[in-house]
Structure formats: structure tokens, C-alpha cells
Amino acid sequence: MSTMTEPAKLLAVLGENNAVKLVLPSGIPKTLEDLKLEIQKQCSLTGDFRIQYMDSDFNAFLNLTSTAELKNLDKVKVVSACVPEHDLQVPPNASSSFCSSNSSPGSSRISVNIFSSSETSSSSSSNLRIDPWPTNFRLPIFSYATDLQLKKANDEFVKTGALFSPPPKLKSDIMQSLASEILRYKPYPSDSEFDDVCKALINTYPFLRELGSETGYSAWKITLKQKMGNFRSSLRSMGCCELKINSLKRRGEGNAHPNQVKKARRAEINFCPDYPCGEDKESQEEERVALLSEVTKRNNEAIIQAKMEKTFPHRRQEIVQDAPFIADVKSRWPALFSHREINAEFRRITTVPLTSKFMAQLDFYAPKMIQMFQKKGGKPGQKIKETITGIPEMDSIDARRCRILKALAIYLNEDPSNIFKEYMDLDFCAQQQMPNTAIGIYAILHEGDDGGREDPEDVGIIIEGVTILQDLHDNATAFHLLFGLMYVLNLSYPQELRYTFEFCQKVLMELDTKKVSNKIQVLKQKLLE
């Protein structure tokens, strides 16, 4: 992100009769990717899009190719990258893909969806979640009977200031609606996310505030947690796959012991979705077989992308429940192992963009991280200095990122050589080292470049002795793709670098930021000082 000191504001047009003010404390971002990231962050926007700006010469919106075209108080427009603007429609009763403040009782909402018709139908038919947890939780629309009782209680509160204690039936109806709305985002909300829901409830309906409670919603929170647990149990008994996978009732079913099933991280919004309506294992297996032939054709990215989107539930159930070897996954789903599809799969699972988010956040924290690293003493400090020597003068941003990631591991008392492997001879590497590598990033150096100062000849990723990706540009690209593969292939973080990966998860990607280990929490506080 930009380090400019002068703040800026932009008017972002999201659709007809729908616009928001973008506040940029650090000024206009230097790159288009950073601006897109800022729009996604402030507007809770999902889906691919392009940005247009109001050109003063023609008095019309033109495609933005550089943020140098922008200045303070300019107007920009968000347009889907999938379809022309005139094809974008607002579906009835659709949830907004942009963030907005909580709706007051009786107020209407403006809904905007930037996905193309094919993407929308695919997502809706497969019941995939497409929205991350909102910055401001929006209450659901309650039933007519519930809304009527709340309106009467509100009128009484306005007249006399009397708080309202809802009867059991009304409270149960409110809890059921809230639980259903929570499930739109995730089945296992964190403690602070329960706080978000309860705060939205008592802020919208202040007469529901509890006397004698420090927060005003302590009992509401306890009741909501219980309701959410009961709601999950009910859905699990109906066969909901993403909930059944976490149940101890799986003990004895088939050959899988329940403790062998890796549980979903809280950031995995679509961990193990059910098959969409009208689809089953057999029909999606036919799509998978058809996908194998499409992969062999040239200039076929659009069809491959559509089939990968369609077969996502089948692929996730196979990876999560069966836990196949990586070699088997690669042979059954060869289209998955590309830069583009890893990004797409990661976004399906978490609703968060991988590459743009990772690189932008790494660059944003880099100056502060270098300052911290230089203060480290002892042997770790010496290793860090050897690793980051020459960073300020380096021309290659990719080399800079890689050195920072290696220094980060050392700073966290971890050995980066557990992941980053450097070789001079590709044949020797392939024959002697790769089959014995559980997980790692290999770099084939140029002859005579034993210090790794030049860009390597080849960079790739190895998992379970299988070369997953190769011909990557640099180690930083390989590392963030490896991080994405942890989610895509449902892998646990390697113990040797678990703090480094946790830092990427909770600080760089801002995933599951509510529960942080002490070591990462201290580092995060230092970065924000």
C-alpha cells in the first residue's frame, strides 16, 4: 500500500443508486492492485472486477490503467470483469456484495452483485458462500409476527424508556433468524463474531439491552451460542456434509477414524460443501472426466475455469473426506495445479484473493519488519543480517520479498532451510532429494551463484515427493502459492515453520485473526506500533 502522508477520498460508484466514499488515510495507492485491494476491503466486495475513472477530457468513465490518473475527490466506478456493464442486474432479495451499515427496522436495502449470470447461478446452485464475514453485521429480515412485536416494544421504549424482555417464543424466533444469517457466512463463528451479531441486535433494537450486563448483551450471546450449536446439530442430522465431517459420530464409519480428519480452519468459509441441487457424486464425476480432456486442449481456459467451479463440491469432498495422496490428486485434478486455479480455489474456500492480498500486505509491512529484524541480536540476528543484507539497494522486488520471508522465519526461531531448498544441479536434486521431501520449495541456482544473489533458473514446489509446480518466477511466488495449497489440499502447516505460516495466515492474509498465539500476537503489535 502507499506510504503517502496526505490522505485522500474517492467516490466509488458500485451500481445504480449505490455509491460509497472511500477513505484513504495514506493517499492514493501507487498500484492498481493496491487500489482494488482497498476497494475490496472497505466495501466487502467479492468477485473479479475492473475500475473506471471519470475522465475530465471526455466527461465519461474510462478504464483505469494506472492510479496516476487519480487525484483526491475523484470519482471511480466498479465494473464486473466478467460481463459488460449493461448485463449486470440486481437479483431480487439478493444479499449485497458491498458492505453497508446495519439496516434500521423497516428500512430497505440496496443489493448489488457483480458476478456474471453464469457465476451467480453456479454459486447459488451449489450453495457456496461468496461473502466474507461483514465488517458491520447486517441483521436478517425477521418474520412479520416478530417484526410487529418488536415495533410495539420500540414504540413503548420511545415513550417511556422501558426495556423489553421478549417471551420465549419471540426470543426463539429471533435466535433462529440470527443463526440462519450467521450460517450464510460460516458455520463456526468465533467469540468476537458472536459479539458482532449481538452488538448489531442491541444497537438496532436498544430496548433489548440487558440491565446489569457490562456489554448489554451477555445473556443474548450465551443463548445465541447455544442456538447455533443446536442449529448445527439439526443440520448435521440432515446430512450437511461440512458439519458431519466434524462429528465424532463418524467413528466406525468406513475406514476413517474421526481424529484422522483435519478439522476446518475458521477461515475456510466453504470447507466441504454439499452437492448442488440436481447433482450427485456420479454426475460430478462425469464432469471431472470431461475436464481431463479439456485440460489437453489449447486456449481453453474459460471452459476449464467453468468446470473447475462446477466440480468444486466433488473435489472438496474427495480431498477432505478421503485424504488421498498428493500424487493421486494431481492425476485426478491436473487443472488444479496452476497459478490461476490455486488462486481461484483458495478464493472459493476462503472468499479472499490470495496473490494480491498476500503480496500487498507483505510489501506494506516490509519496512517495519526490516527495522525489527535489524534489532535482533545473537546468532539469529547474525543470520538475519546475512539474509537481508543489501535489501534497500535491491532492484528486484521479488528477491526482496523472498529475503524478508526467510528473515521472518529466523526471527520466529525457525529455520527457513526446512522449506527453501537451493541446488546447483537439477538432475541431482530430482534424483536424490525431491522424492524424500515432504514439503518444500526448490530453487535451481545458476552455476557459480552459491550465494543465491541472482534470479534462479527454476523454482518449484514439492509436496510428498511430488513436484506440484515448477517454472515459477521466484521463491516469494512459490511460498505464497504453497500457503494457498495448504488450504486447497487441506494440509496442516509444517511444524518446522508453523509460526511463519501462522503469521501469513493471521497478519498478511488477515484470516482467522481472533485467535492468535502469543508469539504472533507480540510480533503483530510491534508491526502496528
Image (spheres, rainbow, N blue to C red):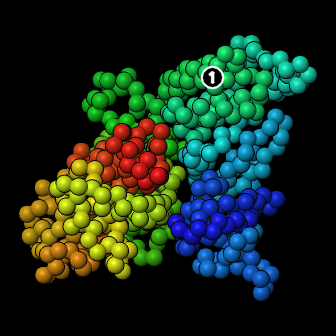
Side of 353 relative to 388 (left or right):
right
Residue 317 in view, yes or no: no
Side of 486 relative to 443 (left or right):
right
Residue 262, horizontal then vertical, whole percent: 33, 37
Q: Residue at x 58, y 53 (%)?
A: 122
Mark 1 secondary-structure assignment: loop
Query: What residue sits right under mark 1 in the picture?
Result: 214
Residue 253, horizontal then vertical, whole percent: 32, 26
Disc 1 crowd, CA 10 A, few/some/many (<14, 14-19, 20+): few
Q: Picture quarter containing residue 4?
A: bottom right
Residue 256, horizontal then vertical, whole percent: 28, 32
Residue kind at label 1, given as amino acid type:
Glu
Side of 50 relative to 380 (left or right):
right
Asked if 492 appears above or below 146 in the picture, the reply is below
Residue 71 in view, yes or no: yes
Q: 423 or 438, which is in the foreground?
A: 423
Q: 354 or 272, which is in the foreground?
A: 354
Q: Residue furthest top?
A: 167
Asked if 398 appears above or below 421 in the picture, the reply is below
Q: Picture quarter containing residue 90?
A: bottom right
Q: Residue at x 23, y 77 (%)?
A: 453
Q: Residue furthest bottom?
A: 57
Q: Picture quarter containing residue 103?
A: top right
Q: How many marks?
A: 1
Q: Residue at x 71, y 66 (%)?
A: 10
Q: Residue at x 59, y 68 (%)?
A: 5
Residue 295, horizontal then vertical, whole percent: 39, 67
